[in-house]
Image: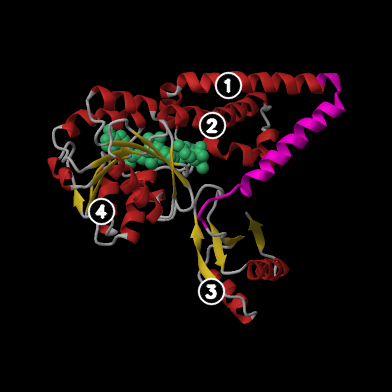
C-alpha cells in the first residue's frame, strides 16, 4: 500500500512520529492533520511534515486512504461519529490508543467495522507532544493490529504491509488479547513505577536524602513515572478489569516476597532473583522475526559544537566504519545521547573499547 494521502487527528508524540515516518518512506504522501494544539500543527507544516492543516471535523480528511486517530483514548472515540458520514469505502480507519476494548465497542455500535483496524505501536516515551516525535520512534517495534470483525482481508494486509514498510513489526491480535497482554507488560509497570515514586516521596525525610542519592536502580525502574498523567489516567480507566486482575497477581507476588524476607528464606529469595534474572535476560534474545541485528552503541557526549565530529574522526582514523550516527532523545535516556550504528559486531566492539579508553561513557544495549 502506497498511501497517496494520510490523515491524523492528534499530532503529538505518536501521531507526529508516524507522520514523520510516512514522510520519510513516502515523501509524495500528502499529510492532512488536525490537532487542538495549533502551534504543533504550524511547526509540522513548517517542517514539511504536514501538507494540509485541517479544522476540527474537517470533511477534507475524507481525501485520505488511511486515517490515524492519535489523540488520547477517549478523544479518539469522540471523533468516530463525525467521521462515519465522510469515510470513503476504501478508507482504513485506525487509532494508536494503548487500550483497544472501548474503541472497538463504539466502532461496532456505530457500524464502522468495515473501516476499522485498531493499531498500537509498542514504542513510546515518557515525553509527550509533537516536539518529542521522531521518524524512527516505531522502528523495530512491534505494532499491534486489532482488526474489526467486519474489515476485509485486503485492508488488513494493506495495513500490515504499510506498518512493515515503516520499519515496525506488525502483529495481529484480538482486542481482548491485546488489552490483557498490555495490562501486564505496560499498564501494570506504569502503576508500579508511579506508586514506587510516591512511596519514596512519602518515606523521605525533610532533608530529602532518599531523593538526593537515588541512583541507577531507582531511576531505571521509575523512568516511566514521568509519563503524561492525562494519558495514564485514561488508560487505567479504560482497561480497569484487566489492570485490576494483573494487579491482584502482582500484590500476591509482593506479599510472597515479603514473606521470604521476613522468614529469612535464603533459598526462596535466591530462586526469586535467579528466575527473574533469567527471564529478563531472555527478553533481548527473543526472536525478532525479519529484523536484522543492529550493532549500536550509545555514548554520552557534551552537547557542544564539534563533539560528534571528534568521535566520528576518532573512529575513522582507526578504520572503523559508521553506518549511522545521531543524537537520540528517546525512551531509555533522560538526556540526549549519541547513537552510533555499525555494520558489523567487530566494529562495534572495537569502537566501544577505543571510546572507553578515551574516557567516553558507553552504553551497550
Ligand atoms: N506515549 C506513549 O508511549 C504511547 C505509546 C503508544 C501509544 N500511545 C497512545 O497514543 C495516543 C497519543 O499519545 P501520545 O503519547 O502521542 O500523546 P501526546 O500528548 O504526545 O499527543 C496527543 C495529541 O493529541 C492532541 N489532542 C488532545 N485532545 C485532542 C482532541 N480532542 N482533538 C484533537 N487533538 C487532541 C494533543 O494536543 C496532542 O498533540 C494515546 O491514545 C496513547 O494511549 C502512547
Ligand atoms: O517507553 C515508554 O516510556 C513507554 O512507556 C512506552 C509504552 C510502554 O512500553 O509501556 C507506553 C505505552 C504504550 O501504549 C506503549 C509503549
Per the model, the C-alpha gap separating discs 3 and 1 is: 48 Å
The magenta segment:
262-291
Task: Give the numbered dot on residue 3.
Answer: 4
Label 2 close to label 1 by CB (< 8 Å): no
Residue at point 19%, 51% (across, down): 52
**Mark positioned earlier in the residue sequence (2 or 3):** 2
**Mark positioned earlier in the residue sequence (4 or 3):** 4
Per the model, the C-alpha gap separating discs 4 and 1 is: 41 Å
Residue at point 14%, 44% (across, down): 60
Residue at numbered disc 3: 309
Which x, y percent locates residue 304? Answer: 52, 66
Residue at numbered disc 1: 247
| Disc 4 secondary structure class | loop
**Mark positioned earlier in the residue sequence (3 or 1):** 1
Q: How many marks?
A: 4
Q: Is mark 1 within 8 Å of ligand 2?
A: no
Vertically, is 53 above or below 345? above
Per the model, the C-alpha gap separating discs 2 and 3 is: 38 Å
Q: Is mark 2 within 8 Å of ligand 2?
A: yes
Of the pair 125 and 173, the residue shown nearer to us: 173
Amino acid at each position: 500500500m502506497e498511501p497517496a494521502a494520510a490523515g491524523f487527528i492528534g499530532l503529538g508524540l505518536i501521531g507526529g512520529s508516524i507522520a514523520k515516518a510516512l514522510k520519510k518512506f513516502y515523501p509524495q504522501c500528502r499529510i492532512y492533520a488536525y490537532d487542538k494544539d495549533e502551534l504543533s500543527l504550524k511547526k509540522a507544516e513548517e517542517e514539511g511534515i504536514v501538507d494540509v492543516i485541517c479544522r476540527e471535523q474537517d470533511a477534507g480528511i475524507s481525501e485520505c486512504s488511511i486515517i490515524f486517530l492519535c489523540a488520547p483514548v477517549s478523544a479518539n472515540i469522540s471523533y468516530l461519529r463525525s467521521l462515519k458520514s465522510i469515510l470513503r469505502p476504501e478508507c482504513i480507519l485506525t487509532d494508536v490508543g494503548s487500550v483497544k476494548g472501548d474503541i472497538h465497542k463504539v466502532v461496532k455500535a456505530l457500524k464502522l467495522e468495515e473501516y476499522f483496524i485498531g493499531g498500537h505501536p509498542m514504542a513510546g516515551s515518557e515525553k509527550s507532544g509533537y516536539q518529542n516525535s521522531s521518524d524512527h520512534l516505531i522502528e523495530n517495534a512491534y505494532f499491534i493490529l486489532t482488526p474489526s470483525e467486519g474489515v476485509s482481508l485486503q485492508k488488513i494486509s494493506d495495513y500490515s504491509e504499510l506498518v512493515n514498510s515503516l520499519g515496525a513489526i506488525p502483529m495481529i491480535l484480538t482486542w481482548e488479547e491485546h488489552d490483557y497482554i498490555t495490562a501486564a507488560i505496560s499498564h501494570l509497570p506504569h502503576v508500579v513505577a508511579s506508586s514506587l515514586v510516591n512511596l519514596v516521596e512519602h518515606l523521605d525525610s525533610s532533608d530529602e536524602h532518599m531523593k538526593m542519592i537515588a541512583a541507577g536502580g531507582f531511576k531505571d525502574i521509575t523512568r516511566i513515572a514521568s509519563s503524561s498523567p492525562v494519558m495514564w489516567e485514561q488508560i487505567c480507566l479504560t482497561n480497569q478489569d484487566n489492570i485490576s486482575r494483573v494487579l491482584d497477581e502482582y500484590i500476591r507476588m509482593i506479599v510472597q516476597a515479603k514473606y521470604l524476607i521476613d522468614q529469612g528464606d535464603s533459598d526462596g529469595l535466591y530462586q526469586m532473583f535467579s528466575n527473574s534474572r533469567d527471564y529478563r535476560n531472555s527478553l533481548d534474545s527473543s526472536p525478532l522475526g525479519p529484523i536484522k541485528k543492529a550493532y549500536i552503541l550509545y555514548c554520552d557526549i557534551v552537547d557542544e559544537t564539534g563533539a560528534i565530529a571528534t568521535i566520528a574522526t576518532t573512529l575513522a582514523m582507526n578504520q572503523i566504519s559508521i553506518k549511522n550516527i545521531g543524537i537520540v532523545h528517546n525512551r531509555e535516556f533522560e538526556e540526549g545521547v549519541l547513537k552510533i550504528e555499525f555494520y558489523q559486531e567487530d566494529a562495534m566492539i572495537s569502537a566501544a573499547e577505543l571510546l572507553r579508553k578515551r574516557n567516553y561513557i558507553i552504553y551497550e544495549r
